[in-house]
Amino acid sequence: MKKYVCVPCQWIYDPEVGDPDGGIAPGTAFEDIPEDWVCPICGAGKDAFEVVED
């Protein structure tokens, strides 16, 4: 699964890890995260994330 980076703060969402503190279980694809989820570091919305290019 692809990783996504928060453009404002550079936090990386890794689907293998998820965001347990934000209610996102490990193994959850970015596309399957609810639209109202926000970055756990800076509070930016999903639209502030971009795919991490390997």
Image (cartoon, rainbow, N blue to C red):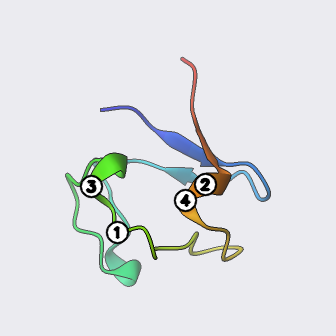
30 left or right of 42 in image: left
Q: Residue 43 carries which label?
A: none
The answer to whether marks 2 and 3 mark residues whose Cβ atoms lie closer than 8 Å is: no
SS type, badge 2: helix
Q: Residue 32 carries which label?
A: 3
Amino acid carrying label 1: it is Pro
Q: Which residue is drawn at 36% across and 49% down?
A: 30
Q: Which mark is residue 34?
A: 1
41 left or right of 3 in image: right
Q: Residue 46 carries which label?
A: 4
Q: Where does label 2 land, which residue?
A: 47
Pointer 4 local density, CA inside 10 Å: few below 14, some 14–19, many at least 20: some
Tell me the quadrant of the picture where the C terminus can be found. Answer: top right
Can residue 15 be seen in the rendering of this structure?
no
Pointer 2 local density, CA inside 10 Å: few below 14, some 14–19, many at least 20: few
Label 2, label 3: how many angstroms apart (C-alpha)? Answer: 14 Å
Where residue 21 appears, as percent x and y from the top left, is 39, 82
Q: Which residue is drawn at 27% across and 55% down?
A: 32
Tell me the quadrant of the picture where the N terminus can be found. Answer: top left
Picture quadrant of residue 23: bottom left
Label 2, label 1: how many angstroms apart (C-alpha)? Answer: 12 Å
Picture quadrant of residue 43: bottom right
The answer to whether marks 2 and 1 mark residues whose Cβ atoms lie closer than 8 Å is: no
Q: Which residue is drawn at 56% across and 75% down?
A: 40
Q: Earlier in the sequence, mark 1 or mark 4?
A: 1
